[in-house]
Amino acid sequence: MAERVNGSEVSPRASLLGFGAAFVLGLAAASFACWQLSKNFRSLDELYVIEAALIVFAMLSTVTFAVVCLTGVSERALGLAALLLAVAALAFSGFPPWMDLVDTDRSSPYPDPARDAQIVLEFLVPALIAEMIIWRVSLRLFRKESRADTRTTWPSLTIALSAALIFNPLGLEVLSSAIKQSATDWLAMFWLQIVVGVIVLLLIFAWIEHAVRTRFLRHSSAQAEA
């Protein structure tokens, strides 16, 4: 069954292809982030375990969003599904059996908070990146099939800036130093303060961009109705 959207036909096959593209894009971005983090943390030997978990999570996210979109529930339900998946990723990233599986080569019986934080980040950050991309593509597909405006107030520029600041050699080194807090690293506390400060600034930038995009969309919608 096909629907007419803005003068064009949107078929279930096209929608499934869209969700397939969302899965590929999300998994590709997540895999790159995971590889960068693992390389920086010098833990490439555990990359295949985390990659397998990311594939499962990306598939779960894609299927969940596809079901919500194709059943035409609501855009709010799509957002709720994204929130629940994010919470699930957060909970799984710190799940003790999962962390033990990743860190099978740990020789010391004593807790290592820095190493635990690395394991959490190696899965959580790529998983959230994958989910965000799949969600945004799914939301666009949902709005197209609902004949709604596909433009959003999502702070995409701030997100792109955040990715650029993190996934580069200097950014990853600063992040690693802030996490480890080694006694031999005199700048560890300084880098931690820098990381916290940058996060606060990015949140402020995201809020400003969201407000600007909201005002722009309202203005353009008012002009279109006039």
Image (cartoon, rainbow, N blue to C red):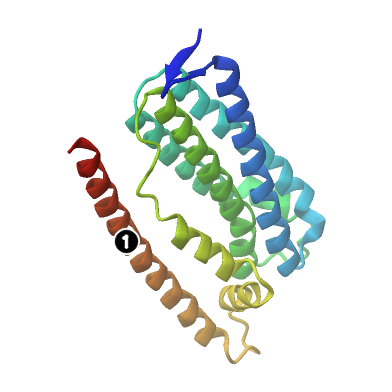
Q: What is the x, y in percent for residue 102?
A: 72, 52
Report whether 5 appears left or right of 187: left
Report whether 83 appears left or right of 120: left
Q: Quadrant of residue 211?
A: bottom left
In this rendered view, identify the residue nearer to me: 204 or 1.
1
Tell which residue pokes out farthest to the left in this image. Answer: 226
| 70 shown above or below 93 | above
Q: What is the x, y in percent for residue 86?
A: 47, 44
| 156 shown above or below 73 | below
Q: Quadrant of residue 171?
A: bottom right
The amino acid pointed to by label 1 is Trp
State the residue position of label 1. 207
Say few, some or many: other residues with alpha carbon within 10 Å of mark 1 (under 14 / 14 to 19 / 20 or more): some
Numbered label tally: 1
Q: What is the x, y in percent for residue 62?
A: 57, 31
Tell which residue pokes out farthest to the bottom in this image. Answer: 186
Tell which residue pokes out farthest to the top in this image. Answer: 1
| 18 shown above or below 39 | above
